[in-house]
Amino acid sequence: MAKVCFDNRFMFTYESKSFPGVNKIALQVRKDLYLVTGFHAGEYAKGSKCKNLVIYGTVDKSDYLDDLDKRGLIHLDDIRGKWEVYSFQVLDNPIEGVDHALVIAGSDKRGTIYGLYHLSELLGVSPFVNWNHAYPRKRKNVFLTDEVNTVTKEPSVKYRGFFINDEWPAFGNWATEHFGDVNARCYERVFELLLRLKGNYLWPAMWRNNFSMDGPGLESARLADELGVVMSTSHHEPCMRTGEEYSLLRGKDSIYGDDWSFINNREGITRFWRDGLLRNKPFENVITMGMRGERDSKILGEDASLKENVDLIRDVLKTQNDLIKETINEDLSKVPRQIVLFSEVEEFFYGDEKTKGFKDDPELEGVTLMLSDNNVGYLRTLPSEDMKSHKGGFGMYYHMDMHGGPFSHKWIGTTFLPRVWEQMTTAYDYGVRQIWVVNIGDIGAQEFGLSYFLDLAYDIEKWGGQDAEITRKYAAEWVEKQFGAMLPQSGRNKVNKILWDYTGLLEKRRHEIMNENVYHPLHFGEADMVLETSEGILKEAKALKKKIEEEHLSAFISLLYFPACGTANLMKMWILSGRNKLYAEQNRIEANDIAVEIDACVRTDAELIDEYETVDGGYYKGFGKSEHIGFVNWNQEDDRFPIRRLVYGANGSRLLVARKDDENYMTGTEWCNKPQTWRDMLRPDVDKIEFDLIAAGKEPSHFKIVSDCEWLSFSKTEGEVRTRERITLSVNKGLINEKIVGTFSVEDVGVSKAVVTVEAAPGQVVPNLFMENDGYICIEAEHFADKKTVAGGEFKILSPYGRSGSAVKLFPSTADFSGEKDLPYLEYRFYAESSGTYNITFEMAPTTPTVFKPKQFMAYSVNEEEPIVVNTVRQVDRPFFGSPQWTLEAMENVKKVNVAALCKEGENALRFYAISPGMILERVLLVRDGVEMPESYLGPRESYRFTLTN
Amino acid sequence: MAKVCFDNRFMFTYESKSFPGVNKIALQVRKDLYLVTGFHAGEYAKGSKCKNLVIYGTVDKSDYLDDLDKRGLIHLDDIRGKWEVYSFQVLDNPIEGVDHALVIAGSDKRGTIYGLYHLSELLGVSPFVNWNHAYPRKRKNVFLTDEVNTVTKEPSVKYRGFFINDEWPAFGNWATEHFGDVNARCYERVFELLLRLKGNYLWPAMWRNNFSMDGPGLESARLADELGVVMSTSHHEPCMRTGEEYSLLRGKDSIYGDDWSFINNREGITRFWRDGLLRNKPFENVITMGMRGERDSKILGEDASLKENVDLIRDVLKTQNDLIKETINEDLSKVPRQIVLFSEVEEFFYGDEKTKGFKDDPELEGVTLMLSDNNVGYLRTLPSEDMKSHKGGFGMYYHMDMHGGPFSHKWIGTTFLPRVWEQMTTAYDYGVRQIWVVNIGDIGAQEFGLSYFLDLAYDIEKWGGQDAEITRKYAAEWVEKQFGAMLPQSGRNKVNKILWDYTGLLEKRRHEIMNENVYHPLHFGEADMVLETSEGILKEAKALKKKIEEEHLSAFISLLYFPACGTANLMKMWILSGRNKLYAEQNRIEANDIAVEIDACVRTDAELIDEYETVDGGYYKGFGKSEHIGFVNWNQEDDRFPIRRLVYGANGSRLLVARKDDENYMTGTEWCNKPQTWRDMLRPDVDKIEFDLIAAGKEPSHFKIVSDCEWLSFSKTEGEVRTRERITLSVNKGLINEKIVGTFSVEDVGVSKAVVTVEAAPGQVVPNLFMENDGYICIEAEHFADKKTVAGGEFKILSPYGRSGSAVKLFPSTADFSGEKDLPYLEYRFYAESSGTYNITFEMAPTTPTVFKPKQFMAYSVNEEEPIVVNTVRQVDRPFFGSPQWTLEAMENVKKVNVAALCKEGENALRFYAISPGMILERVLLVRDGVEMPESYLGPRESYRFTLTN
């Protein structure tokens, strides 16, 4: 077994004919190896003796490789001509005097670089080693055997990269702090990160900076090319020039004119574009085409017709292609170009019934059509059958960070892997394989999501597929990579849990749009769930932090502690604010205690940012800066910290009696009593209810709980309440043979007496049916009783996934059953307490139609009636993107489709049929007509069902 | 000129044949005179010498009077046989050895008593001398001349009194504190107060007490009779027995049975009534008839039909009349009886189309029909023409205090005299003259309103009429009576202003139903008005208090300081709470300062009550106790103190720009700016607008105001804002010849810039037309341009009156123009800026229909179109009383009738026609269709009108 060791005797080759960028990366890898082994690699001199040698190079750019190839020790033909491929071979005695060698041969510049970084990775070096100072384990006796030998395949997606966007105040401040500007020194770090993550493509920061001017000059562009980074410009910046450039260069006497209008200033704009193409011609680029208004606005006024817009873009495209032919290559097919169908450009592309869009314009031939997501990670239109053969292929402009509608999310990365996994795998299935670019905002605090996006793009076979469980595997590996050196497996397991917990919270609601009104403070325990998860994160993360050694704090805080605790603390703060609000409205004394806790959270928020920005000598300074609390507009303008509400106790004592999970309370007073009946105990799985005795007066209450029902018992029956006392009511179901009704009273001695009616039963059990209780039936989609698979369509469970943790999706992602008779379905069986109308809500992932028309169909049926087809899009006279439904679904991360059906008393079967592609069912809620469900964000917990596993 | 002096040489007669009660009152009057003069009156022995003598007695009960009459010095025939009349004569040498005498001769027991108290009054003794220790001026050389000689007329209303009700915790605690119980010792004080106020009739406290059992025994009843107080029982307690009595005496073995049901327990109930009648037979009573359920509830269940209810009451009436004939007098016409048409009893009385009520039942002959108000002082049904001849006449059960729907008002008396003046004068005009009884709650803090009610009932010619100005006269005299001894005229003027100010606030909204949501915190300056009035009261009252000598503090605090400051502080507290809420929602830093002020108000509330209850050795202990803050139900259960909201400043600086009177603000930020246009300056009377620069951030803002309009100027154009800075914008109208539009900007330097557009004009002036501005025209009803008077109907201005201070009413109060063609009207002329629909709101006093049917009509017309008749009652399928409209109008003290009309551009004339009786127009608001008026409670200020007096 061939073997190569990395101890005090290993060396690296160096060839001047190699790509200079490749040699630069080799130096980095040598530093990486030093971190692991403690030994500096020497530089191998040809012909000298060497125990262990790393030989690297690119096809046709290395004498060593040519020699090895000639001698049959490696096979360059395996990689030659391929895109970003490398061969990675451990060999014994490859060269005279060399005992062992690792041979890294790249098919091209980036292939070699990826091969080099592969070595670092194999030795446990994180891609974030320099970005987050995520240092590897120090190891002794480090070696590789030929078991690692491999020849890679081409990456799944050709161009894989990110967009530094919305980069102030975070990235901008960070760059200024460390490099004085967003210049080449800064980009060198960014390029390294991109390449280590196996990316190759970048849209540079452009809010206040000009990539090709600030290097200084072209230095950043030159460096990118040297290191193999393919540059482009953002979706609305054509011909390799930023929007800010025009602002800088325009003027009355400017050769470019003084109007960003292709109609009024055709000559100036054309010249501006030509000069940009000429300037950046030496480098590897993907050229953005098309045109939008200044600062990402509409190109024509609100009054312009669709035809005027389409005609303008056609004209622009023709002009740009002519310029490219003139300046770069007569053969346009040799020039990578893209057009981004973002915002309203999508409308101009597709056109409408009256006006043809520019979709089939010949100028688009060979231009990559960049599609985009709905700004929060759900794809918009996908290539239809007729488009699939488009020369130039398709790309995806995806958002993990957004400064814009429906809301900005910029602070801490919010990526919940299953969402990205499901959507980007779908994109790939639809043929979106040419370019993937993700808006990653400030980079800082986005590392986890960015890693997955680029890894998926690099190897979709490995990280895609139809089983969401792969995301757990990814997360576990990611944790191992970043935290392996600082925590034992038990600690890493905790990190893993924290990672899922905080991104799980964000999958329900993101930071900026959290507020006191999102979760109901009590109903269905949803606020309790968020609060407990958040407090768990804070507690565990704090405990872990104590165990981290100083040198690892930088990585621990930036990659876990800050994003997790920042998120958890913010969620906690808003849950407390919601409680404070409700409690204050109800005069609960506890509101005042909660106000103090809110204040602590506000302070903690600042402290967490401060800790992140000061750790590691202030290395992350700037990265915590984005506003993130209480947005009331799409952006941070006029945002709000929580309001703290303080109450006065009522005169005397006042006792409120309320279920832990119900905002309605009883005062038990003479005239305004509101007696309640509790029916949960009719469920076979419920024999306990927690309720609160709540002080709302200046004086404490002396309470007494009395009941003559021997089947009822209480955790406490007498005492004093100063703030709140939680009581557990238990039913001894062993004493009950049939439905029984009893009462108990809670007396505020001498003041009031609340009487509660309790209904209990051993529980109606019909095997495999979800049982109605309190007027509703709630079913997690994964708990279908039956499913029908047809040719070309099969439902599979997604887990982990979505707000509730699981869902069901029809595969393949491209399956479209429009117009088909034989539909795949899921069947849910439930027991209705009475016959009549039930209002049904299908809770689905907020996917958007894959077609531009506002059409996305599902169907349902009850008890084998004919399926009723429903368009999930409510407003059909406008594009879905930008509609109120789009906004709401993007914010709540759920699509709710409301229908109604007649059910019969007893057993019923409800079927859900997928028709349009991309329907993902999460939950089903049936509510008897006339029953008013308590307000909530996530809805009730699942109904009871007796199965053999119960 | 005859003259009698009250110095160290005056005496009182004493005759044992006189009514013992009369002699008791004479002793009180002698004490009153001592307070004034410092001299104790001696007791005159017949035949002895005497300089100055007070001779008092009752027709046929005094030898002195008989002698004087015989000698022609007085004329008993002037008063003999009359009801409660007295002759009051100053004579020289009336009896041998007596130089000067005052002869007080009463037609009956109460006539004499009123005559005696008249002497106290003439010498400046307040009726509240013993109740509130309102001590008179000490005077030297006190005398009366024959200029005061008078023979009174009979009182306007036969039975005049009050109802001590809802008497816990205030009156109950007070009585227990001072007398150990609500017993005869307590009632002696109450009777004295009643008689001094010229009342004669009482419904005793009955929440937890039994007037005829707790004296002890019959002592209270006996004492009432001795002093001439006519007793009755409350509206739902028949046959001189309280409801609580039955609770005490019922039981399984009770002779009265154990069921308050005339159906199930006819025998027991009948016996209970018979025993009551027999027990109280010796005394002067008005016997309550009819029957309600226990504790003032419905007598039959909710399911009982109208017929069942009517039949039951007929049966009850017959039984009760039979009992009265059997026990008291065969001639029922000799026995004063009443039935109270309160709550749903009114429905049973009138019946409906299908079921005749008990209205014309022969058993009602001779029974006084007691009508009632809507629980807040507006009368319900009044005697229709066909009822007016009813034998037994009519009475009124009126509320100045209420424990019940639509809301309780129990704390401090809320009486605004013009409301009582207008309504009770109307009642009198309708023939309601037999009994007036007012629910006065706890008596404490209700003294002002009670005085007026009884004075009006005693002499309606003096205090009624058609000119509301009489209430100002009354208030001034009342102030003189109570505060004459302690304050000079200038001080009393201030007291008078305070009195009007605080009752004026209460006329807009009462204590218990004030909350943070009543007045808009900014719009139309309504909150400013309440706040300024409240702060003025607090400041002036405090200043006055410093000048009050110790012995007068008791009266000053109880009759003015506590009710005025208690009210003002409460209003202030809620206005601040409303501001705190809005400001917190808008992130204004000022919210935090206001929270501190709210806390001060909460503390002040407690301190004021404490001061009231501890002054004068704790004499008022109990009277401040009623809950009065933040009712959310009709009663105090679950009431709420204000919530204080605290905010955090946004990061950095944030400047909000807002008009002083507008909740909308501008941030002047890049994406979410909301520029405003201000149009007030188009009004000829407006050349200034105040606006605020409001800090909402952690850091102060540096502001700069810039405009290139030379016709605009600012009170300040640069500076720093830490909380709020108020700027006055002035327009130099001298520089403007026509409508002009300009802008100015307010910059938060380096952060944001808000731009305001200002429209200004010299002002469009059309003489005598109200000019539209900002889309609306608002007119005070008193500012009609024309009015039409017809036979039997003339509009007159009421001032002071209502929420806005004035109104217009059609007189006489009984005028009914239903079915008439020739209607009286008011005409309003205004200038509309454009032709089109205008939505018109007639704001009227919330009077209720005078008939039982839900019908109350007015009419309106625009530009001499045919009048359109409108029923002001919105829900016509149910009685008005108890309807949502009734509730809302009672709470807001306004009836809003919304109609719409087409107006033309330019001059228009709107007419308001009264049809049903009792329509009182306060304001008219016309809003151009499509214009959304800012939220407010009181509405906008009046529009501009150019008149010759301008």
Image (cartoon, coloured by chain):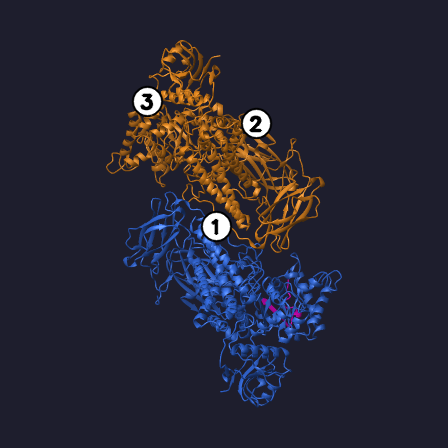
Chain colours: A orange, B blue
Measuring from the top left, give residue B930's x and y in whole percent: 42, 52
Measuring from the top left, give residue A866's x and y in whole percent: 58, 34
Return the mark for residue A331. Answer: 3
**A812 or A385, which is in the foreground?**
A812
At horizontal 49% and vertical 82% (from top left) the residue drawn is B141
**Crowd rating for badge 2 (residues with CA inside 10 Å; few <14, some 14–19, many 20+):** some
**Share a chain, discs 3 and 2?**
yes
Which contiguous range is marked in magenta?
B355-371
**A157 or B493, which is in the foreground?**
B493
Q: Nearer the viewer, mark 1 or mark 3?
A: 1
**B372 or A149, which is in the foreground?**
A149
Up the image or down, B652 lies above or below B852; here it is above
Residue for badge 1: B645
Residue for badge 2: A789
Separation (CA) of disc 1 from disc 3? 68 Å
Q: Can residue A473 be seen in this view?
A: yes
Q: Circle 3 — which element? A: loop
> Could you tell me which quadrant the C terminus of chain B lies in?
bottom left
The question of residue A219 being in magenta is answered with no
Asked which quadrant contains residue A795, the reply is top right
Return the mark for residue B102. Answer: none
